[in-house]
Image (cartoon, helix red, strand yellow):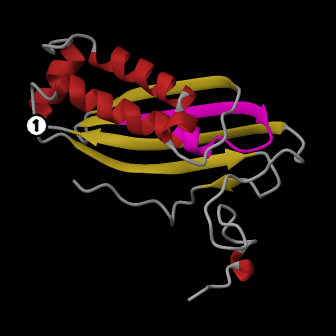
Amino acid sequence: MTRDFSKFEQSLTHLDSEGAVHMVDVSAKVPTLRQAEAGGQVRMLRETFEAIQAGNSPKGDVLGTAKLAGIMAAKQTAQLIPLCHPLPLQKIDVQLVPDPQLPGYQIRAMVKTKAETGVEMEALTAVSVAALTLYDMAKALEKSISIELIRLLSKSGGKSENYTLSENSKIKSQN
């Protein structure tokens, strides 16, 4: 049985008219300034949070290592996500902000480029790997650390409209 995928060509850009996966051709696009911000959170026991804040982790600098891992991951996104274009990234900023209310950390990543396609996946990858690294660095203190709410917060540039996560779209964290 042969399926006709031509009607999906516009909406499913990573499928060709035959339904086969392919990398989108962006060579005809004009490079423009593009930026994306992603966020997530890592929740843990108060004792774990306090140990990290005090610098008392058996593996060393938890937050510095997680920040560096997030930056490095953004630069490797095309190696990790099969159909992502390799992009020249001009700015990557990863922040791990203590949140005693969780307790845990809010993670934010901002990525900027001047290219033919956006950097949403790079920002999301930075947050994801920073969170995973935080877990790895602190798992000796606690195995039940939870990685939560990884999502795109905003994007700008390119042909599609700018996007900002609205208050109505935000998933409320569980306390």
Residue at mark 1: 143
Residue at 62% x, 48% y is 154
- Residue extending farthest front: 1
In the figure, is residue 52 to the left or right of 87?
A: left
166 left or right, relative to 67: right
Give the left or right position of residue 71, taking residue 105 as reference.
Answer: right
- The residue type indicated by label 1 comes to Lys
Q: Position of residue 117 (x, y in %)?
A: 74, 44
Tell me if residue 27 comes above or below residue 66 in the rendering: below
Q: Quadrant of residue 35?
A: top right
- The question of residue 13 being in magenta is answered with no
Q: Is residue 6 above or below residue 74?
A: below
**Element carrying mark 1:** loop
Q: Position of residue 99 (x, y in %)?
A: 31, 34
Is 95 placed above or below 99 here? Answer: above
In front of the other: 99 or 90: 90
Q: Which is more toward the observer, 77 or 165? A: 77
x 50%, y 64%: residue: 169
Q: Which residues are magenta?
A: 106-123
